[in-house]
Image (cartoon, rainbow, N blue to C red):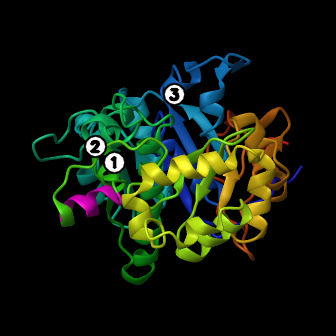
Amino acid sequence: MTTSLPSGALQGVKVLDLSRILGGPFCGQVLGDHGADVLKVEPPQGDDTRTWGPPFQEGVASYYFGLNRNKRTQLLDLSSPEGQARVRELMAQADVVVENFKVGTMEKWGIGYEQMREQLPQLIWCRVTGFGADGPLGSLPGYDAAIQAMGGLMSINGEADGDPLRVGLPVVDMVTGLNATIGVLLALHERARSGLGQLVDAALYDSGLSLLHPHAANWFMGGKVPQRSGNAHPNIYPYDALNTGGAPIFLAVGNDRQFRLLCSHVGREALGQDVRFATAGQRSVNRVELKALLEEALLVFDGVSLADELMAIGVPAAPVLNVAQALEHPHTQHREMIVEMGDYKGLGAPIKLSRTPASYRFAPLSEGREFLPDPDVDLDKAEKPAA
């Protein structure tokens, strides 16, 4: 049987994914979804996330399955001379290397960026680290929750009268993975002009700080340390979860016109003309009074149906759904955000390209020994991708 070559915007790009855990593997999956040929090399015991469960499928955790689609994998001990020799061969075939070893580890093995750059000047090297390679915290290991804590994210997350709270998903790791992907794409674009690779430096610390909008901008201009505000936006109101007679509703009212439409729809037209609430700035200043008045008006409504009605007239609103409800929503299906390949089920690619869309060729744990051959090579003996 002939195996189809990758399709997509990155067809022909070969990626050697030496990374583990989240940021690097997420980058590799995005590149793979868009047609790159990704070979993931794991240590003999496998990526740590294979054990991060339950749930498990055939002994491998769901966490691993969520990050390693569209890759073929092989196990290799990079600390051994044989493993080092093999990875040099793979680097010579690759366009991109993605790795997130502790700074100095690959150098100790003789296969670090500076050591390989002269031999492979065209190679794009994406390094995902906690804090970068130098500076006061350089070379130290970094973890999502720790960066959320020291990067200020926890300080502005949670209820106003509560304790600092970690965001309920690994947002720093995931954004670092996206920044790594952007860096790789920029480097590929530049290489088309210069013929040279370069180092893409993606640090969790930088990515965590980059998420501080608008809190950093508020602090730069106003000098007031941002505080927790629960579900409410620090600059806009009503941009908050409000109680109704049924399920809660999230209102995301961004301008005066939307606010007047909201007031009219819930039978409180006078609020739209009230000097305390007539402008965005006044609504933000007087948010406590406004929230109480709106929740009083919303007691006669069901949140789910009210959200549909408001969206229909141009007022941004949404019911507060749980994960299962969100994944089962008809629009999730319409946007093709659920992918199924045999026993594998995962989230679809959020980047939609009209001519070169994402494709799903390999389920996690697909074995492979080499990069796929070039288009003019017969593929009859190539590894069969997951159905």
* Image: 328 above or below 222: above
Q: Which quadrant would the C terminus be assigned to in this image?
A: top right
Residue plotted at (59% across, 54% down): 30
User: Is 81 situated above or below 255?
Assistant: above
Residue 171 seen: yes
Judge by depth and name the residue closer to the eye, 109 or 191.
191
What kind of element bears circle 3? loop
* Residue that badge 1 annotates: 208
Residue 315 visible here = no
The image position of residue 272, as x and y in percent, is 57, 70
User: Residue 69 at what x, y percent from top left?
Assistant: 67, 43
For the residue marked with disc 2, what is the amino acid? Gly
Q: Amino acid at mark 3?
A: Asp
Marks 3 and 1, Cα distance to the nearest angstrom? 24 Å
Residue span colored magenta: 213-220
The residue carrying mark 2 is 152
